[in-house]
Image (spheres, grey):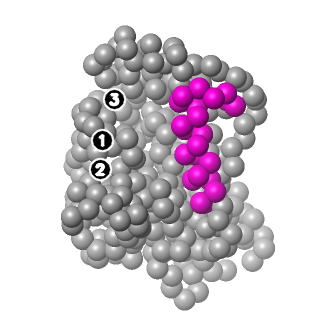
Amino acid sequence: MKKNVALVLASGGARGLAHIGAIEELQRRGYRITSIAGCSIGSLIGGIYAAGKIAEAHDWFTSLNRQQVLSLTDFSFGLSHIVKGEKVLHAIQQWVPDCLIEDLPIPAAFVATDLINSEEVVFRSGSLFRAIRASISIPMCFKPVDYNGTILVDGGLVNPFPLNLVQRHEGDILVGINISGRSRMPEARVIGGSPAFFDKLGRIGDRAEEMWNHVRQEMEQTKHSRGLDYISLVNRTIDLQIQASCRLMTQMMKPDVLVEMAQDAYTTFDFDKASEIIDQGRLLMSQALDRYEQQS
């Protein structure tokens, strides 16, 4: 049975912590990752793995509670963003020093979006954390990255599941982890929350923590909703675009092993649920490998 793996990690916010559990399951079953590609949170976890620090990532993420997650959120209400996005990366660099991508022990590729020229940017060399910082820059949330005369944002806008970018080796198997699978939508609750949402924003003013918590609560409340309030409409529109891109890439590249998590399983900001999400990633990878091994 083939054991060398070309691994691709998709975008998807906090759901991307499932990548940690999935990688741990690959390792436990004797698979060897020989190349990696990622987008957004997939770039972060992929870069950490390539640098040899996946065990440290497990311990660090699972140690965070909601208040600690908030403490790593450097609010900065600019015209283009509400979070700088530097504080959390600085914290991670305490246990994953920056390095050159080309010096990593395996070939790696990380995707960002050139907002000015409307094109994909793929980092295969240069600073690891510069590539990660660009790849995770969710529009309207994290501060965009100035780079070589242009502006870079989250790679999920152009290629959220970069199966076509991983560097393959002869005889390897293509393993993809898509954390924006088809939503389950088990119930249809209509929530008409737009006026209340804007009233809330008006009352809280500059109280950043309250606003952040409120947005999280709105997203949690509406992740199964078919209503058309402001938060659910914007969030659902982006979700559907990402889902469609992931499905198309899967059909084009046909990975040997495909792991899929429902897009509505967790919200983008559920980082305080790390242990649960990591366990889900491990379980989903185990089930996918069982299917692959039975067919091999």
The residues bearing labels 2 and 3 have C-alpha atoms spaced at a distance of 20 Å
The percent coordinates of residue 259 (x first, y second) are: 64, 59
Which residues make up the magenta segment? 225-246
Q: Which residue is mark 1?
A: 80
In percent of width and height, residue 71 lies at 29, 30
Magenta-colored stretch includes residue 177:
no
Using the rendered view, name the quadrant where residue 279 is placed: top right
Check the image and name the residue furthest to the right.
295
Q: CA distance from mark 2 to mark 1?
A: 8 Å
Badge 2 local density, few (<14 within 10 Å), some, or many (20+)?
Answer: many
Query: In the picture, residue 148 is in which quadrant?
Result: bottom left
Camera-side residue: 232 or 70? 232
Q: Are marks 1 and 3 in contact (CB under 8 Å)?
A: no
Circle 3: element type:
helix
Looking at the image, residue 167 lies above or below residue 177: below
Labels 2 and 3: the sequence-earlier one:
3
Q: Secondary structure at mark 1?
A: loop
**In this view of the protein, can residue 283 be seen by the observer?**
no
Q: Residue furthest bottom?
A: 170
Badge 3: how crowded within 10 Å, few (<14), some, or many (20+)?
some
Name the main secondary structure of what is drawn in magenta. Answer: helix
Kind of residue at badge 2? Pro
Against 123, is 80 above or below? above
Residue matched to label 3? 70
Residue indicated by mark 2: 144
Q: CA distance from mark 1 to mark 3?
A: 20 Å
Q: Amino acid at mark 3?
A: Leu
Q: Residue at x 78, y 73 (%)?
A: 295
Residue at 67%, 27% in the rendered image: 227
Where in the figure is residue 265, as x and y percent of width and height?
62, 39
